[in-house]
Amino acid sequence: VGRSVPPFELKLGPDGEILFRGPSLFKGYWQDPEATAKVFDAEGWYHTGDAGRFDPEGRLIITGRTRDMIVLPNGFNVFPEDIENALRDAGLRESIVLETRPGRIEAIVLPPDRPRVPTGDIPSAAPAGFSEPPAELRAEIDGAVKRANATLGINQRIDGWRLWPAADFPRTHTLKVKRDQVKAWVAVEEAARNGNGASGAKGDAMGGSPAAKAGTDVKPGAKRAKTRAKA
C-alpha cells in the first residue's frame, strides 16, 4: 500500500489491525452513532478491520481482514488470504481457507477448470448422489495443495481440502465470497460426516487418497509448533 502522508497518521493495533486518523477522514456514519462508536476509539483512531504489517522500509502491507484471521491453538495468527494466494499461484484459482476444527486448516476449492458462475444458492450439504471426484481431478487438486504448502510456513500449511458442490461460491453483488455461508456449509458437512459418514469429496493435503474422516493428520515432522516461536 505504501507509506502514510502527513497530516495523516497510521499505526497498527495490538492485534495487527490497521488504524489511521487525519483531518479529512470521515467523522462517522450518517445517523448511526452505534456503528460510528464501533470503528472510532476515544483518541480518534479509525479501526479499519484490515490487518497489516510494515516492511523494513516502513511501507504498509495489508495481510487480510481481522475478522477472518485464524488464531491457532498454539497462539499463531494465520490469515486465510495468504494461503488462498499461495493456492492461486499453485493453480487453484478459487478457494476459501477455513479452520474447520481447532488447529485444522482446510481449503474449500472449486475445480481448476470450472468456469465461475455467480450464484446465491448455498448447498445445505453435498447434493444427493454426490460422489468422489475423478481420480485425475483429485490428483490435480492434491498436487496444487502440495505445491502451495511447499511455499507456506509450517503454521500456515493446509491439512486437507473439500470440493465445493456447486458451480461457484455464494457471492455478494460485488462478487465477494460470502465466507460465513461457506462456513455454514462446512458445519453441515461436518455434522453429516460425523453422523452419517462422508457426504462429500474431501482430500488429505499430505496424501493423494481420500480422508477416511475429518481429522486426518499431517505427516510426521510437518506438525505445527505447539508454542509461539520466539521473535
Image (cartoon, rainbow, N blue to C red):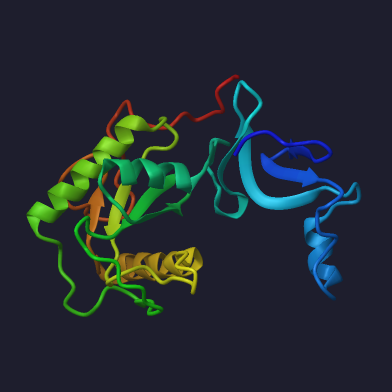
Identity of the residue drawn at 30% across and 31% down: 150
Percent across and percent down for residue 176 are 47, 64
The answer to whether residue 221 is seen in the rendering is yes
Q: Is residue 174 left or right of residue 139?
A: right
Camera-nearest residue between 52 and 22: 22
Q: Quadrant of residue 33?
A: bottom right
Q: Residue furthest right?
A: 42
Q: Is residue 10 above or below residue 25?
A: above
Q: Quadrant of residue 115?
A: bottom left
Q: Is residue 51 above or below residue 34?
A: above
Q: Is residue 209 left or right of residue 157?
A: left
Percent across and percent down for residue 86 are 36, 40
Q: Is residue 143 left or right of residue 100?
A: left
Percent across and percent down for residue 225 are 46, 28
The answer to whether residue 159 is seen in the rendering is no
Q: Classify the position of the C terminus by image quarter.
A: top right
Q: Classify the position of the N terminus by image quarter.
A: top right
Camera-nearest residue between 3 and 187: 3
Percent across and percent down for residue 226 are 49, 30
Q: Quadrant of residue 8?
A: top right
Q: Is residue 200 left or right of residue 228?
A: left
User: How many labels sit on residues?
Assistant: 0
Identity of the residue drawn at 85% across and 60% down: 27
Identity of the residue drawn at 40% across and 70% down: 185
Identity of the residue drawn at 34% across and 76% down: 123
Camera-nearest residue between 78 and 103: 78
Q: Is residue 110 above or below residue 56?
A: below
